[in-house]
Amino acid sequence: MPDSISKSAIHQYIDLDTTPCQKVRKALPNIHYRNIPFNNMDQTLQVSFTAIIVATIANFFFGFLWYTPLFGKAWAKELKFDMSRTPQKGEMARGLIFSLIGNFLLAFVLAHNNAAWGFVPEMKGASSASIIANSAIFTWLGFYLPVDLNRVSWESASWKLFFINTVYHLLSLVIAAAILTLMS
């Protein structure tokens, strides 16, 4: 890095030419070290807020379809809901608002995650289908599937409820990833 360009504190901290890193290099000479050019690190994440809103709304309606006409009765039976009881207006409004907030957070974070992966050189030439699959499947494997499995293990949830919920989680991630990828 030229002397005319001052390094930020973070660049000085992680620069491989600093004294602590030189000591590590001498101690472990057989490891290949790669200097990362920091001029590309100052880029901002580019996300489409229109895509985030569309993904939020699409997943909101997908959740309605999944947990009402498609699997609503089976889901309610597994949770031992009283189907004769009509929820109060406040309960329903609260549930819908929380669902909308949750869908927004999912789309917002997934959009930023996908944008961050855009900085990885190997991802530059990836197809849209590859980006969608990687985003959805790895997010599901790392963050949703373990929680769903723990519900079976620790909360005595049935395997039927597990499959209803975990397939919903995977498909909702695919929907969001597809919208975010194709609209960005």
Image (cartoon, helix red, strand yellow):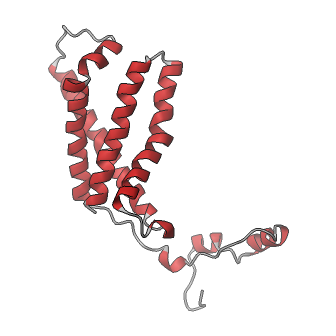
Direction from residue 125 to residue 15 in the image, left or right: right
Q: Position of residue 178 (x, y in %)?
A: 30, 52
Q: Is 151 positioned to the left or the right of 24 in the image?
A: left
Where residue 58 sits, quadrant-wise, is top left
Q: Is residue 64 left or right of residue 19?
A: left
- Viewer-proximal residue among 97 and 181: 181
- Residue 36 position within the rendered picture, expressed as x and y whole percent measured from the top left: 59, 75
| Residue 79 in sight | no
Which residue is pictured at 39% across the width and 62% down the height?
A: 115
The outermost residue toward the right is 27
What residue is at 50 percent from the left and 67 percent from the top? 122
Residue at 81% x, 67% y: name it. 28
Please name whichever residue, 40 or 158, is drawn nearer the observer in this view of the structure.
158
25 or 157: nearer the viewer: 157
**Quarter in which the N terminus is drawn:** bottom right
Q: Is residue 97 above or below residue 159?
A: below
Q: Position of residue 45 (x, y in %)?
A: 38, 65
**Quarter of the image where the C terminus is located:** bottom left
Up the image or down, 174 lies above or below 98; here it is below
Count of marks, rendered view: 0
Residue depicted at 58% across the width and 80% down the height: 7
Q: Quadrant of residue 3?
A: bottom right
Q: Would you place residue 120 above or below residue 6 in this image?
A: above
